[in-house]
Image: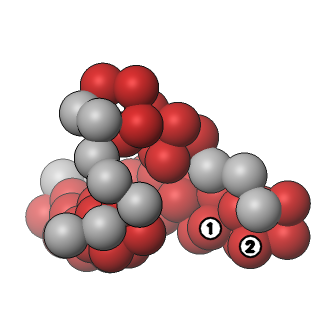
Amino acid sequence: MTRERIIRAIAGSFILISLILAVKVNINWLWFTAFVGANLLQSSITKWCLMDDILKKVFKVKD
């Protein structure tokens, strides 16, 4: 699995988990959803993603 697919899977998982937490625990979990969405938008504009850097350094995941 490539880094790009892993990043998409992580982002999608974060969004779904935070939506579930917003419904079941506290509505303020939607701020986390907004944070993930803002980071996805930022990475599409700047072509830089922190999660990509983390995966490169920690897990040595291929391109």
Q: To which quarter of the image does residue 23 belong?
A: bottom left
Residue 62 shows in this picture = yes
Q: Secondary structure at mark 2?
A: helix
Q: Which mark is residue 2?
A: none
The location of residue 8, given as percent across then percent down, is: 38, 73
Name above or below for residue 52 compared with residue 42: above
Q: Residue at x 40, y 26 (%)?
A: 57
Q: Nearer the viewer, residue 35 or 27?
A: 35
Query: Is 43 left, or right, of 24 in this rendering?
Result: right
Q: Residue at x 85, y 70 (%)?
A: 45
Q: Which residue is mark 2?
A: 44
Q: Check the picture and name the quadrant holding the N terminus.
A: bottom left
The location of residue 24, given as percent across then percent down, is: 14, 64
Q: Which residue is mark 1?
A: 40
What amino acid is labelled 2 in the image?
Answer: Ser
Q: How is the image coloured?
A: secondary structure
The location of residue 44, given as percent across then percent down, is: 74, 73
Residue 34 shows in this picture = no
What amino acid is labelled 1 in the image?
Answer: Leu
Query: Is 56 left, or right, of 6 in this rendering?
Result: right
